[in-house]
Amino acid sequence: MKEENKKKSSGDESGDSARSSRRNFMKSFGLIGAATATGGAAIYSGYKYEKKKGPKDMVRVLTEDNQLVEIPVSEIEKVTSDLKVLQSRGRQGIAGRRWVMVIDLAKCRNARQCVTACQSAHNLRPYEYHINTLIMQESETTAPYFMPKPCQHCDNPPCVSVCPVDATFKRPDGIVLIDNERCIGCRFCIAACPYSARMFHWEEPKLVEGQEDLSYDVELNVPQRKGTVSKCLFSADRLREGQLPYCVSACPNGVFYFGDENEDSVTNGTTKETHRLSSLLEDNAGYRLMPELGTQPRVYYLPPKNRLFEFPEDQKPENHTTKHA
Ligand code: SF4
C-alpha cells in the first residue's frame, strides 16, 4: 500500500507545473517551521540583521510581509499583536488557497492524539471538544469503526447564515471561523449546525500561564471567553505558518490528509506523503457527511474498508452506554 501511495505521490502525476506546484506546497509545510521555534508571536520586524549571518545562534523567522530571514537569536523580541490586525487578517484568510481535509476511516484506531493535540492548542478541558472520535456502526451486521469528527467547514454553512451579529463567517480560503469579540452567545449557530460541531463556553475557559496578556487571535480562538461559542478552526494559525493542523500532525496512524483543493493536493500528516486529492477520493470512494443537506462540507471521508486491526471488544457499541448513530 505504501509503495502504491508513493507512486501516486510522484510517479504517475502529469505536468511539470503540477509537480512544481505540489513541491512548493510541501516545502511551505516544512521550511517555515523554523520560525515557530521562536513562538507564534515572535515576528521579527525589520531586515537590518539579515546580512549578519553567522554559524551560531542564528534562527530563521518569517517577517510580517512573508519573507524568510535569518537573524541572531539575541535580536528577537516578542511583540503583542494588535486585536484589529488579527481580526482583519483572520477574516481575509490565506490568498489563493482552498483548504480541504480527508479522513481515512480505515486507519483510525481511536488513538485520540488528534483530540488531545487540539485541546492543548486551544486551551480546552478534557471534556471540551473541537474534534472528537465517535464509535460508529451502520447496522447490526456491519463492523463498527471510529470516526474523527471536526467542523466540516461547509461551503454553504447554515451556522453562518443564522448568526445575527456576523460573528461567524466563511473565508475565501474555505475556513469557517468565529470572532469571539463579536459573539453574543445566542447559540443560533449551534442549533443550525447539522453536524453538532460547535460547543458553548458555559464556564470561564481554561487560562494558560503566560497567556494572560495575549491579544485575542481569531485564528487560534485563544484566549477564549465565557458565554461564547467555539469549534474547530482547521488550525488557521498553523496554516499561516506553513504547517499542517494540530490534529493532522499529531495522528500516529496516518488517518488525516490536509491540503489545498486549488492544487488538487493533500499531504498525509503521519507519512508526509503528498497525493492528488481527486485520485485519492475517486480511488477510495471518498464521500462527505449528509450531502443531501446541501451544506457542501470541505471534509471528506474514505470508507472504513479493509481495516488492518481488530476493533477492541470493550469499545464495541453494545458495550457502550452512549451509542452514536
Ligand atoms: Fe457550520 Fe456546522 Fe458546517 Fe461547521 S459543520 S461550517 S459549524 S454548519
Image: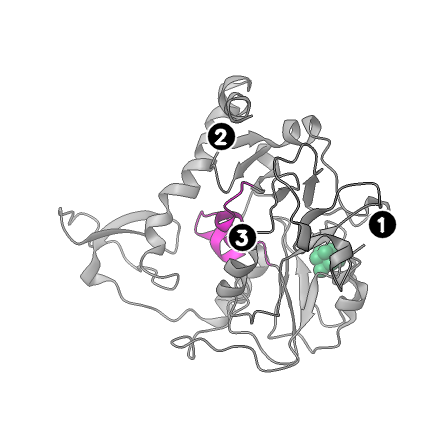
Q: Which mark is residue 267?
A: none
User: Measuring 70% from the left and 28% from the top, which residue is drawn there?
Assistant: 282
Viewer-side label of 3, 2: 3
Q: Is residue 137 left or right of residue 298?
A: right
Q: Nearer the viewer, residue 323 or 277?
A: 323
Is residue 214 visible to the viewer in this orientation of the structure? yes
Is residue 62 visible to the viewer in this orientation of the structure? no
Image quarter in which the N terminus is found: top right
The correct choice, above or below, for 221 with respect to 6 in the image is below
The reply to whether the C-beta atoms of the residues labelled 1 and 2 are less than 8 Å apart is: no
Residue 270 position, x and y percent, is 49, 41
Upstream in sequence: badge 1 or badge 2 = 2
Q: Which residue is mark 2?
A: 21
Residue 271 position, x and y percent, is 47, 36
- Ligand 1 - quadrant of the structure image: bottom right
Image quadrant assignment for residue 284: top right
**Image coloring type:** one colour
Q: Which residue is mark 3?
A: 247
Identify the secondary structure beneath mark 1: helix
**Kind of residue at badge 3:** Cys
Q: Which residue is mark 1?
A: 293
Identify the secondary structure beneath mark 2: helix
- Magenta residues? 233-254
Is disc 2 surrounded by few (<14), some (14 to 19) or many (20+) residues within 10 Å? some
Viewer-side label of 1, 2: 1
Mark pair 1, 2: CA separation:
34 Å
User: Measuring 63% from the left and 43% from the top, which residue is drawn there?
Assistant: 103
